[in-house]
């Protein structure tokens, strides 16, 4: 293990938020655990901030079976902080580097909601000084899902895109990424967030509670959009095929909901519409993170609007995400003593 010269020796213990049973967000517990040590190809990161994603409350509810075998199970899928050690000298990082990363929770149960977190070096990217820890922590899960969907959906310059759920973390990044690709973008949200959609670059901002929003979309893109990106779920959008042109594409974000309602495949096939399921992809994760951070550094991409809560309020944060009471992105502050209560 390589450490930064002059840095405090590897701590023996750390505070972490454990998923203690699968009874929902209320079951998360703060515990003292042995500090992790990075293995080959890994980084040890002193955490500054972490994202709160829908996957977090679903993990606490027991909806992610691939997590059930880990004991202990530390919550948190992504975050940002400072490298304090590396598992070996072969990784392209060194102690002192500021990074954003996807955690190893799905690999070995070591999540990011802790004072220290291990991650695969391949799942991290270095941060320039222009990108804050909070901005960076808002990127990994929603940003990689958005990029996966747009790339798999083969969105190209001049095409039209509808983002269903444009004011959330994934949607707000998808709008900007699509605009940067040269597409024309429409997006839905509540009336309170229409100005946000426009500020992100949406040409057409639609209130999904307005009975006439589908007619407005058809006037904007006669014949239907080329690609529809659904960040919310089929339950929020009846007959999506009616909004997509003949031969277009529908991209859905993987929700990991056990009784998820899927689109009418027969109706899609009849209209020649291709259906794509997108999620944060470990294989291309590093590439996605590097690309988005470079766009942020070049001022071509902004972090979603975010709210920060101390990690001591992690259960509340998950319930707010679960209940849909978040505009943009919800983050957890981790590096201050006051953050732990």
Image (cartoon, helix red, strand yellow):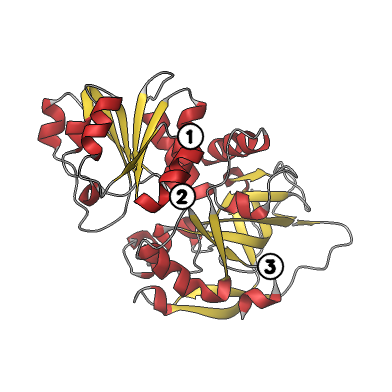
Real-space CA distance between mark 2 and mark 3, rounded to the nearest whole angstrom:
23 Å
Neighbour tally class for label 2: few under 14, some 14-19, many 20 plus, Cα within 10 Å: many
Q: Locate residue 323, reporting x and y percent.
A: 34, 65
Q: Quadrant of the N terminus?
A: bottom right
Task: Say the numbered circle drawn on residue 311.
Answer: none
Residue shown at 22%/54% (left/top)? Answer: 260
Q: Is residue 249 visible?
A: yes
Q: Helix, strand, or loop for circle 1?
A: loop
**Relative to 261, 46 lies left or right:** right
Residue ID for mark 2: 169
Neighbour tally class for label 1: few under 14, some 14-19, many 20 plus, Cα within 10 Å: many
Residue ID for mark 1: 201
Q: Earlier in the sequence, mark 2 or mark 3?
A: 2
Question: Which quadrant of the figure has residue 256?
Answer: bottom left
Residue shown at 66%/63% (left/top)? Answer: 37
Whether residues under marks 1 and 3 lie with C-beta atoms below 8 angstroms apart, the answer is no
Nearest-to-viewer mark from 2 and 1: 1
Q: Locate residue 327, reporting x and y percent.
A: 45, 56
Q: Quadrant of the C terminus?
A: bottom right
């Amino acid at each position: 293990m390589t450490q930064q010269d002059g840095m405090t020796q590897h701590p023996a213990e750390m505070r972490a938020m454990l998923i203690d049973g699968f009874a929902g967000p209320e079951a998360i517990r703060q515990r003292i655990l042995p500090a992790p040590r990075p293995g080959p190809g890994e980084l040890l990161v002193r955490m500054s901030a972490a994202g709160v994603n829908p996957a977090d409350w679903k993990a606490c509810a027991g909806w992610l079976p691939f997590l059930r075998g880990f004991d202990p199970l530390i919550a948190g899928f992504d975050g940002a902080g400072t490298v304090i050690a590396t598992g070996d000298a072969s990784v392209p990082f060194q102690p002192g580097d500021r990074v954003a990363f996807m955690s190893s929770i799905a690999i070995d149960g070591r999540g990011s909601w802790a004072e220290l977190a291990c991650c695969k070096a391949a799942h991290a990217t270095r941060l320039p000084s222009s990108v804050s820890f909070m901005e960076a922590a808002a990127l990994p899960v929603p940003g990689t899902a958005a990029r996966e969907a747009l790339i798999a959906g083969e969105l190209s310059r001049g095409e039209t895109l509808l983002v269903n759920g444009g004011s959330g973390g994934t949607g707000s990044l998808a709008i900007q990424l699509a605009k940067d690709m040269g597409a024309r973008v429409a997006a839905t949200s509540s009336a309170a967030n229409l100005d946000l959609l426009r500020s992100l670059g949406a040409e057409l901002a639609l209130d999904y509670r307005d009975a006439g929003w589908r007619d407005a979309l058809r006037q904007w893109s006669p014949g239907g959009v080329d690609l529809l990106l659904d960040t919310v779920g089929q339950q929020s959008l009846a007959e999506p095929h009616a909004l997509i042109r003949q031969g277009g594409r529908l991209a859905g974000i993987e929700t990991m909901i056990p009784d998820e309602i899927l689109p009418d495949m027969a109706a899609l096939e009849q209209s020649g519409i291709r259906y794509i399921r997108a999620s944060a992809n470990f294989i291309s994760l590093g590439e996605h993170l590097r690309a988005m951070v470079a766009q942020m550094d070049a001022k071509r991409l902004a972090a979603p609007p975010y709210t920060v809560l101390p990690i001591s309020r992690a259960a509340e944060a998950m319930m707010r995400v679960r209940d849909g009471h978040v505009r943009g992105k919800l983050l957890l502050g981790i590096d201050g003593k006051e953050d732990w209560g």
